[in-house]
């Protein structure tokens, strides 16, 4: 069974630029999550989707972050404009039950 | 105040030297406690889910246990390939988000 796919794996941008990350969950998983993991910390939830709908986006900085999940499958997370403190690994996870399965992440460096 | 606290932050073991990692948590209602392993440059890999106090689960050299306030990940006779960061996360009854601790970085030397 294929795991969660993410791209790109690495991205380097200047502050104030925009960036987008893509995630393809495990086939059949209705729930999709985006987490932010800063170096030395555990992942922190940004947004949770159930099919097409947003379940929890309480910790998403909505002035600069946006996410969508079209057709209940793939998802895109966007940052515009990026700040230095957005440097982190962005992890996508999906679940069918309670257990969440993570992709390899996208490492973002903001200069 | 952190909901999930892991200790120690880092642990160095000799191959074959058994030890335990601790995860203390404070939640109003626990849906589940999860253990993940994370290798450098990779996403967290699911290990165990524990649902209620007294529950235990095992996988190879790893055994996870749960009480009402903490969980332990026991590593028996570790090998160098067990070197990784071990993350603990809790899921409350009010939602499905995982609230992670900062992890324990384990290094097993030959």
Image: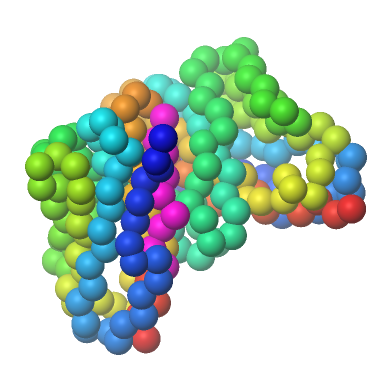
Please tell me whether residue A101 belongs to the stretch shown in magenta: yes
Please tell me whether residue A12 belongs to the stretch shown in magenta: no
Residue B53 screen position, x and y as percent: 57, 15
- In this image, B85 relative to B19: left or right? left
Q: Which residue is drawn at 51% across and 25% down?
A: B49
- In this image, B70 relative to B63: left or right? left
- In this image, A90 relative to B44: left or right? left
Residue A16 screen position, x and y as percent: 22, 83
Q: Residue at x 22, y 59 (%)?
A: A77
Q: Is residue A85 visible?
A: no
Residue closest to the far front: A1
Q: Give the range drawn in magenta.
A: A99-107
Q: Residue at x 10, y 42 (%)?
A: A71
Q: In which quarter of the image is residue B19?
A: top right
Q: Which residue is drawn at 60% across and 14% down?
A: B55
Number of labelled discs? 0
Q: Is residue B69 above or below residue A88?
A: above
């Amino acid at each position: 069974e294929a795991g969660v796919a993410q791209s790109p794996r690495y991205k380097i941008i200047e502050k104030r630029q925009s960036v987008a990350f893509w995630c393809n969950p495990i086939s059949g998983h209705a729930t999709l999550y985006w987490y932010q993991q800063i170096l030395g910390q555990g992942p922190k939830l940004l947004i949770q989707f159930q099919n097409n709908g947003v379940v929890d986006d309480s910790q998403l900085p909505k002035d600069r972050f946006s996410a969508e999940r079209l057709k209940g499958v793939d998802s895109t997370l966007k940052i515009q404009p990026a700040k230095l403190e957005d440097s982190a690994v962005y992890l996508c996870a999906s679940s069918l039950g309670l257990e969440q399965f993570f992709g390899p992440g996208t490492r973002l460096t903001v200069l | 105040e952190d909901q999930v606290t892991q200790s120690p932050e880092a642990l160095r073991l000799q191959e074959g030297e058994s030890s335990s990692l601790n995860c203390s948590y404070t939640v109003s209602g626990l849906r589940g406690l999860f253990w993940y392993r994370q290798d450098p440059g990779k996403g967290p890999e699911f290990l165990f889910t524990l649902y209620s106090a007294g529950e235990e689960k095992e996988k190879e050299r790893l055994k996870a246990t749960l009480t009402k306030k903490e969980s332990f990940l026991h590593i028996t006779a570790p090998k160098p390939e067990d070197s990784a960061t071990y993350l603990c996360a809790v899921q409350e009854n009010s939602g499905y988000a995982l609230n992670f601790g900062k992890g324990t970085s384990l290094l097993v030397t030959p």
